[in-house]
Image: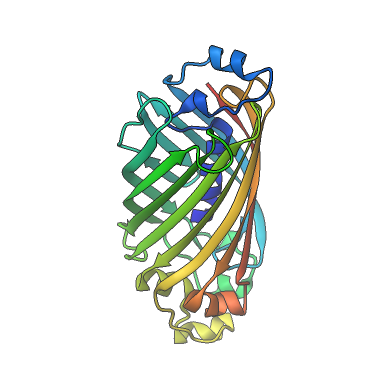
Amino acid sequence: MSRPTSLALSLALASATLASPVAAQTVPPDTGSIASTAAELDPDRDSITAGAAAVYLSDYEGSNDYRWVPAPAAIGSIKGYSFTLAGNRASVDLIRNPPGPSWDLQAGPVGLVNFNRTGRQNIADRRVRALGERGTAIELGGYVGIGKTGVITSPYDKLSVSLSYRHDVSGVHDSGIWQPTVNYLTPLSTKAAVAVFASAEHAGRGYATTYFSVAPGQTLASGLPAYDARGGWKNYAIGGLYTYSLTGNLLKGVKLVAGGTYRRMLNDFADSPLVSVAGSKNQWLGAVGLAYTF
């Protein structure tokens, strides 16, 4: 799975649990129900949400062929420290969340397992299959961010901004990826919430060469023209998610989560024959699943 898949799953679970430093206080004033809901919940309690989703995504980054894949996910907060596991990505916030509504400073490690073009059987386009498989890249790094509760629609919504960097330590593409992200989450009631987000990725020359270049010796087998991709801004993405509690409320029980992402390939990555000839600059992702909050 690619990074946008991870982002979608992360935000889906975040919207399902409202996992933030203010925990129970993020439930909006739903007339007649907020008092009883707040009384049941400890705002500083530990919380873990686990789920699984069916994700509709492209065969490879830049492909115009799509397939369904299953993806696990979990998000939670233990003693004020938050963590996220979303498909092929994991992160931990090492700055303890303060109790009550406040600014949320974030920093910690992030890791991603990049499966892009690791299996020919998963790629429908014969031209791209002829270019060969890539190894599984292990990308490790860190992130910093800041969030604020009560910014736009009510005292209970949250706006967050973050910047992450990860580098391939497995030697597959041996380069780094910078990613700024902005996301906004607002509960609609004690049972429903929506999240929207925007992000972009800047990838190094090694990443571009590994996944988007076509060597002169590969043109005959693939039918694609030779191409030497350089690093730079790789894509931007925008998306949204919706969650609805099927049992209990947003802070406990079973939730339905669904959402989608639009991603636009940019610069040398968009001009690569893998995208411009065999694929598409316009990339889509959809996810639907269930999550349970303990």
Q: Write down the quadrant of residue 233 in the picture.
A: bottom left
Q: Is residue 134 left or right of residue 125?
A: left
Expressed as whole percent of the image width and height from the top left, the position of residue 126 reads 62, 72
Given residues 154 and 291, the one toward you in this image is 154
Q: Residue at x 50, y 42 (%)?
A: 151
Camera-side residue of 38 and 274: 38
Depicted 143 relative to depicted 137: above or below: above
Q: Residue at x 30, y 36 (%)?
A: 95
Q: Is residue 44 above or below residue 219?
A: above
Asked whether, in this view, residue 95 is left or right of residue 222, the answer is left
Image colouring: rainbow
Q: Locate residue 258: give its quadrant.
A: top right
In the rendered image, residue 116, in percent from the top left (x then y), is placed at: 49, 60
Count the numbered circles shown: 0
Q: Can residue 288 be seen?
A: no
Q: Which residue occupies 58% across, 57% down?
A: 238
Q: Residue 178, percent across and down?
A: 37, 61
Q: Where in the figure is residue 241, as x and y percent of width and height? A: 62, 45
Please indicate, yes or no, whether residue 208 appears anywhere in the rendered image.
Answer: yes
**In the image, is residue 200 above or below residue 72?**
below
